[in-house]
Amino acid sequence: MKNKNRLEQIAVFGSAFNPPTLGHLSVIKRLSHFDQVLLVPSRVHVWGKAMINFDKRCDWVTTFISDASLANLSLCSNERELGKKGPITTWALLNQLQNQYPNAILTFVIGPDNFLNFGKFHKFTEIMERWNILVCPETIHVRSTDIRNRVIKGYDITLFTTPSLVTKLVKEDFL
């Protein structure tokens, strides 16, 4: 039975998910103590990295979630509504999510590589004052770039992502 006075614990895991990898999954599996884990594909990359169409990446994340079979996972496509021009900052996303879940404690999950650049995030000090930050390294080191390159060359990707994504990702997605 859930304690009605207990605040919901929500992990917010943002990434390009360009496409999702087993590296992402290695982080997500360690977030099982959260009531919810929101997977948030970036609509536009803050530092200008080229990404596949947002809707396609949201579809990939949905497939990835299905393969992961973890009850607390869900897609959060809030960046679609947050702004149509330019990148969405972590500050804006977390504010919007806190309004959406006013009685929840949000924890922003970040990889060590991004944490090293955390000082470049818009309002990083305010983010640290208002929300929890969890630095969570991957235990399986797979880059989305590796998957894209392998798919383009027609190489096997079964050791890089989940089974349904292996069959869903096609060369045309990355050309």
Image (cartoon, helix red, strand yellow):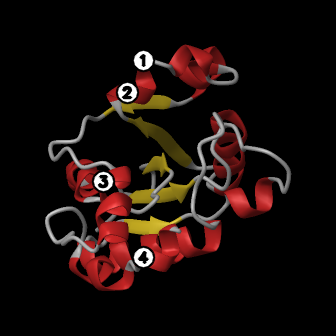
Write the residue at 60% across / 50% down: 50
Disc 2 versus disc 1: distance between alpha carbons? 5 Å
The disc, 3 or 4, on the residue closer to the chain's N-terminal end is: 3
Residue 116, numbered label: 1
Tag 3: amino acid: Asp
Identify the image quadrant of residue 36: bottom left
Residue 113, numbered label: 2
Write the residue at 50% across / 19% down: 117
Confirm or deny contact between disc 3 and disc 4 (CB under 8 A): no
The disc, 2 or 3, on the residue closer to the chain's N-terminal end is: 2
Q: Nearer the viewer, residue 117 or 129?
A: 117
Confirm or deny contact between disc 2 and disc 1 (CB under 8 A): yes
Tag 2: amino acid: Asp
Task: Indicate left or right for 16 with 6 as reference.
Answer: right
Tag 4: amino acid: Lys
* Residue denoted by label 4: 171
